[in-house]
Amino acid sequence: MPPSLKLTSRRGASKSKKQSFTSSLAFKVFALLFILVFFFGYVFVLYQNDMILVEKSRHTAMVMKSPSGVKKPATVSLRGESLKSRQEEHLFPPFPPLPPFAPIPHEEALIALVMAGQPTMAGIIALLNRFFVALHESNRRLAADIKNHQGDLDNFVYDIRKAFFDLTKEHLLPFDAVYRGRPIFPIREDDSIYISLAAFREHLLGKTLKEVFGKAKHPERIFVGAVVQNCFGVEFTCKTGAQVVGKNKQGRDMTKVSDAPPDANGIEEFCGDENFKKYCDAGQVRALYVNETESLGPAVARYHASKLWGGETYFVQVDSHLEFTTDWDSKYIAEAQAAKSYPKAVLSAYPPGFGDYGDGPFRESLGAKLCSCEFSTNAVEQQIIRVNMGGSYHKADSRPKQIPFMAAGFFFARSELLVDMPFDPVLPWCFMGEEIALSMRAWTSGWNIYAPRKNLIAHQYRPGRMGLPKFWGTVGRLFGEPGPGINTKLQRRMLMRVKNLVGYPEANKENMNQRDDSNILLEIDHYGMGKARTREAYLEFAGIDPQKQTCKHLAWCVNGDYE
């Protein structure tokens, strides 16, 4: 071979080896980079998932440190198992019920997740807090504008209503629309019970919570959501209710409203008790704090309390001044399951009264039935339907008996009720009308209503002369009209929503639109009658005639004819 060809061959072989080496090195570098990218990508995904779970829970939530120093969420034991599973991630870390108005880190991100269909308890509370902050600012602006409305109270009342409607459309209705037709959280099948408590300046809230947990057979399965509407003494001087201070010359009570200290926080009383602190630490008490100036009446407070439900099997609505009998939880579950139409069965009653805690142990008694109604003749209540008791159990019946009415102060049902009958956010300033609306909506959604055969709770009934604060007094002071007058005007228009539901002739849609009251029927189709049974069928069942404004005597209810 010629020397030049040999040289060329050697150079070609050397070049080929270099190319081969270069290609091999590039492949190795590429493979290494691919492995590193995959590894760090995988770590990043794990990190993002972990951060989502953390952000979906409140950073100020209670946590406990493991021996290695790694923070782990506190868990709750139910039936010997950890409650923290894939479907309960929304509850962890537990949302702390104290202190009031604690800031929520990453609240905008949490709210965005809620509105994207990825709810957490922290995110829902952040969303509700945002509504109340906006309402607070709106109320301040309206209150500062009172002087411009002197002698024009009707237009001022219209402005107050419109501001509420605008904020509800902005914050609450879009939230409800995301979860329409399904539960916000998966319903657990573990016999857990959620207690909805709406408390307005309630001095017995702490004692009621102690009754709830202290008398339960399985307190580890009890979860409470409390809407705490208090005077915190920050922007306004707290006031008493109208206290009786003597008699006038005609022998009538004279009343006076006086300055008062900030309200005691019943959540703090309960969680500060060493015997009950563990339930707060475990995330079984959820609290939404509301300044009394943003209190909108019991119906709206109960709407907000329903949003603190976290997937528990049963939903219970009660007042915040109650006594309970021993093992009330297991007994109510058994009573609900004994109803013929269970699981679509609602237990409801007006509980018997009690004087004060410590008067003696509360004992079970035979249950009473909500069998009658009447159209109110009180001018303030605008002929709205009032529910009354009309019969009692006199023997040990084998099953609970049907009744046509629900009490707002106590009902017990499976949590599917929240899907079929979502709470209505558009009933502000109303003290009456809530019960007939609940009754009609539940029944037309296919739920039968039953009177429990035993009274397992007792209620402290409060005459006006006790001088306790009322939400309508706060509304009056806020808007420069002390007394119930301005709230009465607000309630009068909003009761037309309930009247439309019942079928009062003057409250049909055509008449409402002519009065420029179309907002009062806002989203009424979504918060109105169910689709399983008709309004006409309910009115016949309950013996109600909206045209004549009469309620019939219901012998079938008194006698317990329907199971």
Image: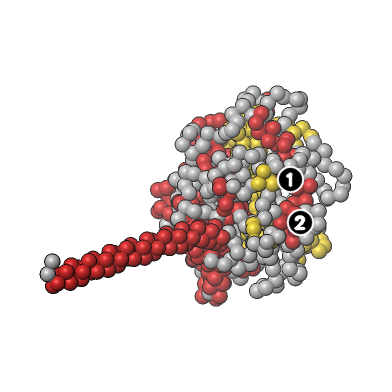
Q: Is mark 1 on a helix, strand or loop?
A: helix
Q: Residue 484 at x, y = what percent?
A: 64, 61
What sort of colour scheme is used for the picture?
secondary structure
Residue 60's quadrant in the figure? bottom right
Is 340 located above or below residue 247 in the figure?
Answer: above
Q: Residue 353 at x, y = what percent?
A: 78, 44
Foreground residue, 406 or 101? 101
Residue displayed at 13% across by 72% down: 4
Q: Residue 477 at x, y = what percent?
A: 64, 68
Asked if residue 282 can be seen in this view, the reply is: yes
Q: Residue 163 at x, y = what percent?
A: 49, 64
Query: Which image quarter holds the N terminus?
Result: bottom left
Asked if residue 226 can be seen in this view, the reply is: no
Residue displayed at 47% across by 52% down: 117
Alpha carbon distance from label 1 to label 2: 12 Å
**Residue 277 tag number:** 2
Instruction: Determine whether, in the image, residue 421 is placed left or right of residue 363.
Output: left
Crowd band around label 2 with a 10 angstrom C-alpha radius: few (<14), some (14–19), many (20+): some
Query: Which image quarter holds the C terminus?
Result: top right
Per the image, the residue denoted by label 1 is: 219
Amino acid type indicated by mark 2: Lys
Mark nearer the N terminus (1 vs 2): 1
Amino acid type indicated by mark 1: Pro
Is 393 located above or below residue 101 in the figure?
Answer: above
Crowd band around label 1 with a 10 angstrom C-alpha radius: few (<14), some (14–19), many (20+): some
Residue displayed at 64% across by 57% down: 73
Is 407 located above or below residue 125 in the figure?
Answer: above
